[in-house]
Image (cartoon, rainbow, N blue to C red):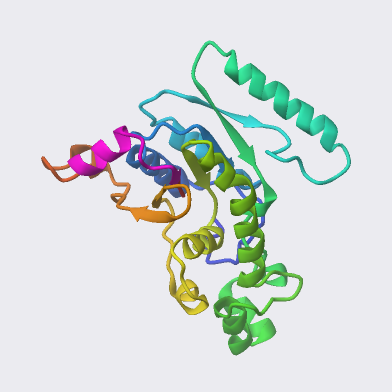
């Protein structure tokens, strides 16, 4: 609803719209041939919804289970108990009678906070702060809106989490699915593809479109991923054969 009204959403915790649900289903179909071992989402409900909905399309029929407390806890009081719950959940997953995949929600993957702009339309923000100032906040790398984050702030926390938490899982040989938000994925893709700040600002990340990367233990290479459309499953002979074979062999380690 907020996107339909062209409001600044940022890290406001709103659920998926009908369009978002359909995009999650289509994206799930596009990656249905990858057997994911672990999923990371943001703490925002729309990110968790997207992961759970997308996994309904998996050919491996794994049941996604949200693990309370995140992978490393929250860094706040009560973490010892949260981590005990995490370990107990992991043990339960190992002994479950059906295939399951753990889902860890972490605030490091939350969408960029736009501070005082959140809830305003672009027109209302321009009237309140000035059109040029709003453009600067939106399009610059290191300028923060009032009580908000710059893209640089978002990149620092996001890439730090990717390096400290996701890369070690890849080193363990796991297939990882990251379900997050436009600016967060822009930051991760820019890091994986070694983009400059200018290239990051120009990068457009479409909603519901999966991006695949293969990891060889030291570097990442982007893999071709088809658009998550209904026609994906009815593609012409040979159109996706190579990609499907690649996925079946488990050569994609990380998908965002």
Q: Residue furthest top?
A: 97
In this rendering, is residue 99 above or below 2? above
* Residue 217 percent coordinates (x, y): 47, 47
In this rendering, is residue 115 above or below 162? below
Which residues make up the magenta segment?
Answer: 241-254
Q: Nearer the viewer, residue 7 or 214?
A: 214
* Residue 36 percent coordinates (x, y): 46, 34
Residue 172 appearing in the image: yes
* Residue 73 percent coordinates (x, y): 75, 40
Residue 50 appearing in the image: no
Q: Residue furthest left?
A: 237
Q: Residue at x 52, y 46 (%)?
A: 179
Residue 123 on the magenta segment:
no
Q: Is residue 249 left or right of residue 169?
A: left
Residue 250 on the magenta segment:
yes
Q: Quadrant of residue 158?
A: bottom right
Q: Residue at x 25, y 43 (%)?
A: 243
In this rendering, is residue 240 above or below 153? above
How many numbered discs sit on the rendered protein? 0
Q: Quadrant of residue 90?
A: top right
* Image quadrant in which the N terminus is located: bottom right
* Residue 241 percent coordinates (x, y): 18, 40
Q: Residue furthest right?
A: 77
Q: Residue at x 61, y 61 (%)?
A: 9
Q: Is residue 180 left or right of residue 130?
A: left
Q: Residue at x 66, y 19 (%)?
A: 91
Q: Nearer the viewer, residue 252 or 110?
A: 252
């Amino acid at each position: 609803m907020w996107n339909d009204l062209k409001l600044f959403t940022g890290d406001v915790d709103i659920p998926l719209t009908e369009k978002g649900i359909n995009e999650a289903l289509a994206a799930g179909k596009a990656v249905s041939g990858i057997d994911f071992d672990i999923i990371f989402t943001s703490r925002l409900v729309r990110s968790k919804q997207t992961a759970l909905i997308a996994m309904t399309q998996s050919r491996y029929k794994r049941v996604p289970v949200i693990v309370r407390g995140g992978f490393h806890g929250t860094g706040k009081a009560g973490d010892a108990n949260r981590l005990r719950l995490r370990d107990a959940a992991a043990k339960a997953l190992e002994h479950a009678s059906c295939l399951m995949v753990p889902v860890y929600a972490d605030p490091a993957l939350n969408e960029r906070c736009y501070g005082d702009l959140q809830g305003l339309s672009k027109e209302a923000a321009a009237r309140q702060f000035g059109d040029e100032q709003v453009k600067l906040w939106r399009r610059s790398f290191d300028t923060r809106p009032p009580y908000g984050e710059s893209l640089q702030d978002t990149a620092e926390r996001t890439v730090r989490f990717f390096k400290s938490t996701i890369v070690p899982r890849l080193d363990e040989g796991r297939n990882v699915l990251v379900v997050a938000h436009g600016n967060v994925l822009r930051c991760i893709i820019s890091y994986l593809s070694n983009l400059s700040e200018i290239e990051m600002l120009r990068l457009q990340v479409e909603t519901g479109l999966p991006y695949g990367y293969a990891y060889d233990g030291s570097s990442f290479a982007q893999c071709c991923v088809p658009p998550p459309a209904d026609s994906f499953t009815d593609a012409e002979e040979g159109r996706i054969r190579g990609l499907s074979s690649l996925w079946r062999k488990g050569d994609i380690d990380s998908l965002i």
